Amino acid sequence: MTPPATVNLTKTAPTVSLDKYGVTSGMIKVNLNWTSPQAAARQAAGESRGLFGRIRASLRSAAASSVDLDLGCMIRCTDGSKTVVQALGNAFGAVDRFPYAALDADDRTGARDTGENLVINLDHRAEFQKLLLFVYIYEGSGAFRGLDAVVTLSSDRGDRFRVVLDECPPQAHACAIALIKRQKGELVIGREVRWFTPADGPGVQDVISRAYRLGMKWTPGRK
C-alpha cells in the first residue's frame, strides 16, 4: 500500500485527480488556517527579547486588528440543484444528507488551533458536479495581505492537498480557492486562487458565483 501523499497545488501544477491517489470514498476535510494580526502580535510580544524587541512588539500590537475569515463551498449537483455551505445564514450543511458537506465551526479570530473545517462526503461523489471552495472576510481587517492563509484538503487516510493563498492584490477581501469537479469520470481538484476586491461589486458570494457561472440566487443573511 502506497503511503499517504502530500501535494502542493501551484500555478505551475494546479490540478490533481483524487482518483489517482485512491481518494474515491469517505470524508475529505477542507481546513482553512490563518494568522490573525492580533495573534501574530501576541506571539511577537511573547517571543520578543530586549528593549528593541519590546518596541517592535508594541508597534505591531498597536496596529493589530481582529479579522474574521469565513470558509464556504458553493455546490452544484448533477441533478441541477444548487446550494452553499457557509456560516453566514447558519447554512452549516450536513454530511449524512443533502448537500453532503458541512462546516464544523465559525472561527472568528484565527486563534482556533484547528481553524475552520469543511467536510465533504465522497460516498456521494456521484451527486456532485462542481464544488467551489471560497473564503471571504466577514468583518475586521479590510484585506487578506499578511494573514498567511492556507487551505489543506485531507483524506481519511492522510493524503494532503495544499493551496497557499498567495499573490494577494491590494484590498482583496475574497478568494475562490479551488474548484472540485467531475472530469472524464474522475473527481479533480483545480487550484484557483482567484482574488476579488470591492471594485468587483457588492455581495461577494454573488460576484463569485457569477464569475463561475453557477447560476445561484442570493438573499441577505446574518450570523
Image (tube, helix red, strand yellow):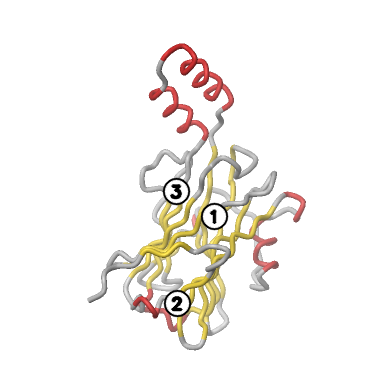
Q: Which residue is mark 2?
A: 17
Sequence-first tag of 1 and 2: 2
Amino acid, disc 1: Gly
| Front residue of this view, candidates 167 and 128 | 167
What is the distance, in whole Å, between disc 1 and disc 2 at their CAs?
A: 32 Å
Residue 103 sits in which quadrant? bottom left
Q: Is residue 84 above or below residue 116?
A: below
Q: Is residue 56 left or right of residue 27?
A: right
What is the distance, in whole Å, between disc 3 and disc 2 at their CAs?
A: 23 Å
Sequence-first tag of 3 and 2: 2
Amino acid, disc 3: Asn
Q: Which mark is residue 33?
A: 3
Q: Is residue 170 left or right of residue 64?
A: right
Q: Residue at x 63, y 42 (%)?
A: 143
What crowding class fits label 2: few (fewer than 14 Cα within 10 Å), some (14-19), or many (20 or more)?
Answer: some
| Front residue of this view, candidates 200 and 8 | 8
Query: Residue 110: image x %, image y %?
Result: 46, 41
Query: Residue 37: image x %, image y %?
Result: 52, 34
Q: Is residue 183 above or below residue 213?
A: below
Q: Residue at x 46, y 79 (%)?
A: 187
Sequence-first tag of 1 and 3: 3
CB atoms of marks 3 and 2 within 8 Å: no
Q: Nearer the viewer, mark 3 or mark 2?
A: 2
What crowding class fits label 3: few (fewer than 14 Cα within 10 Å), some (14-19), or many (20 or more)?
Answer: many
Q: Which residue is mark 1?
A: 89
Q: Is residue 64 left or right of residue 170?
A: left
**Label 1 secondary element:** helix
* Residue at the extreme bottom: 184
